[in-house]
Image (cartoon, rainbow, N blue to C red):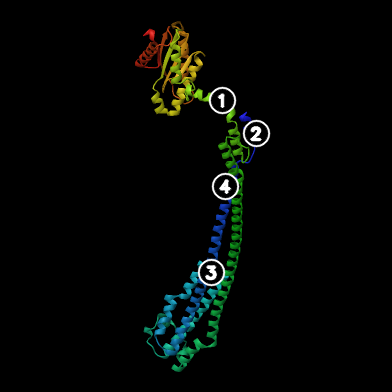
Amino acid sequence: MGNEKQKNVKGIKIRTINGAMIFMACVLYVLVIYATIQISIRYDELIAATDDYIACEKNAALVREGSDYLTEEVRLYVVTFNIQYVDHYPEEVNVTKRREKALDEMGKFPFSKKSGEYLENALLNSNKLISREFYAMKLVSAANEYDMELLPRELKDTQLTAEDRELSREELLQKAQSLVFDNAYQDAKALIMNNVNLFLEEIIEETGQRQSGSAGALESMIAKQRIYISILFVMNILVFIMNIVLVMRPLQLYINCIKEGKLMQIMGSYEFKYLALTYNDIFEINAANQEMLRHKAEHDPLTGIANRGSFDRMREILKASAKPVALLLIDVDEFKQINDGHGHSTGDYALKKVAKLLQEQFRANDYPARIGGDEFAVIMTDSTPRMKEVIIKKLVAIRKVLRNPEGDYPEITLSIGIAFSTEGMTEELYQKADKALYYVKEHGRNGYKFYDEM
């Protein structure tokens, strides 16, 4: 009746809801984490774009500074004739190399080839002025008749034209100043600055595009993250409501029913409905439970046959009877080795197997029991020594099965002592069966012995 009610239980299962909610929450948490990571990536891209622009702006400044420095040094020399400016100029060209280093740094940044070409053109135009500037410094050095051995190698290698070598000191100085101050020189400098400015304009445009793309992706990810968090918030509210409806309210009502000894109302989730039906069925199955408790008190929980207490009660009952009886005391040989070598589960299997065979081979009015860890007994009522052959056949059948185990289970052998009594169950009968059992153990185990044949 209880089972029939259980089959008809319908309702929402808390386990199913929890599983679904946990799965959805995990998915949403993963999405939130993913969105957070993407936000961080997009933010880093924005910062990287800005940092790249700043670095490129610094490189453009280096090209400008390097070119202006060379112009400043050559102009100071042609005006002041101070030879220290002649030393500073080649040091910038050959050692400091601010312009070249700036151009090399540009390869590290993810800007277009076009922007790099502007900076390359600025460097190229700056380099074109170097020969003009060296020539101007050579004119000044020649006009002032400086010792050429004291001048830098580039200046010594610069050769004046035959026409310029005929010029006077004033004419040489005037031409030197003209080379670095005239319109052509100014136009060349303007071209350099124009290339640098074009480079900066291109960098600004590309940086803006990068920042715009990253900002758009960042805004999209932030919007998605808000949606995921909002869904999580709604889910939490739903979980709270379902807990009240499906768990808390039924639980409180059931507690009151238990306190008041009333039947439970069928409500709430599947689990609580199932619990209520089970609780309501207790009165109907109480008798069956009592029978089960009695059975447990009389039977061995592992093997299912009678236990030692039940065996002793049967002995007491049969003491008052004068009917013939036989007693078999049975030990499982080397049971400790089976347990230790193959595990307790194999040991349990061996005990259950022996118990099952005893039940199958002996009569319904016989009484098999487990009286110890690996010890069994069988009381055979209305049995005399004339039944030896019957008993032997039963024992042979049992031993044959145990010697041919199933699967990987080990072979099991038994030591059995048997005694008969015509005066019912006496202490002497038990002692005789025990002595017969001891005899078998002393002579190699794996056998049986009748006491009257010893």
The disc, 3 or 4, on the residue closer to the chain's N-terminal end is: 4
Q: Residue extending furthest front? A: 260
Query: SS at mark 4?
Result: helix
Q: Nearer the viewer, mark 2 or mark 3?
A: 2
Which amino acid, by three-letter code, is at mark 1?
Ala
Which amino acid, by three-letter code, is at mark 4?
Ile
Which amino acid, by three-letter code, is at mark 3?
Thr
Q: Is residue 450 left or right of residue 229?
A: left
Give how far apart the Cα atoms at labels 4 and 2 are.
Answer: 28 Å
- Residue 50: which disc? 3
Of residue 338 and residue 9, the one placed in the foreground of this image is 9
Residues marked 3 and 1 touching at CB (< 8 Å)? no
Residue 6, x across and y down, in percent: 62, 33
Find disc 1 in the rendering and name its residue.
Answer: 287
The disc, 3 or 1, on the residue closer to the chain's N-terminal end is: 3
- Residue 22: which disc? 4
The disc, 1 or 4, on the residue closer to the chain's N-terminal end is: 4
The disc, 2 or 1, on the residue closer to the chain's N-terminal end is: 2
Residue 169 is drawn in which quadrant?
bottom left
Q: From the image, which quarter does the C terminus lie in?
A: top left
Give how far apart the Cα atoms at labels 3 and 1 are.
Answer: 84 Å
